[in-house]
Amino acid sequence: MTVMATLTEPRRCIGVVLAGGLSSRMGSDKALLPWQGRPLIEHQLGVLREAGVDEIRVSGSREDYAGIADTMPQAGPLGGLAGIAQALAGDAELLVIPVDMPLLQPALLHRLHSERPQARSLSFAAHVLPLRLRLDERSREALSALMSRADPRQRSLRALQSALGHEELALSADEAAQLADCNTQTQWHEVAG
């Protein structure tokens, strides 16, 4: 039985940590980097919990975190979202964050979750992630179509956002500073101090 939200019943909000990448530019597993006394992935799970999501999922083959495997290995964040979409039944709002954004605060995610509730796809200006995505038949079809493209450059979060009529929220300078991602050792040291 498919679970559908009604006008009076909001969709469940599922937090997703994208943690399925190879971390090749970092040289070690980003999810396991130490941040404030625990692995970065655990910090990010805590940020989602504090933001008030109903459930949390980890994208990527991570047994210790009940991770959901990507539908296509090395297909980037889109492959991770496709895996999540296949694993979840019914409609939901996904609040998607990367594992490598340690300065992200729950209040900013709460803002992303609560503003512009009609938006099918929503992020902050000039940033692909974090992302709020309405998971329903239309977005599942868009994910499937993009994943079937032969050219890997056409399998991107930006292509998904474009297919769904993406919207953006403005950011203050303080908010923008929270969206520093750490793909390399240099970026990590700049953020971690």
Image (cartoon, grey):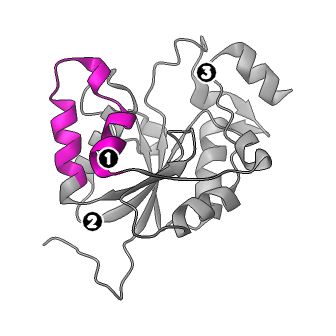
Image quadrant of residue 74? Answer: top left
Q: Nearer the viewer, mark 1 or mark 3?
A: 3
Position of residue 33 in the picture relative to residue 157 (left or right): right
Q: Which residue in the structure is indicated by mark 3?
A: 183
What is the tally of numbered marks visible in this picture?
Answer: 3
The numbered mark, 2 or 3, whose residue comes first in the sequence reads: 2
Residue 103 visible: no
Please, what secondary structure does the residue beneath circle 1 have?
Answer: helix
Does 62 appear above or below 66?
above
Q: Distance between the residues labelled 1 and 2?
A: 12 Å
On-image quarter of the N terminus: bottom left
Q: Amino acid type of disc 2?
A: Asp
Residue 93 visible (yes or no)? yes
* Camera-side mark, 1 or 2: 2
Q: Do the residues labelled 1 and 3 touch (CB within 8 Å)?
A: no
C-alpha gap between disc 1 and disc 3: 23 Å
Question: Would you say residue 163 sits in the magenta stretch?
Answer: yes
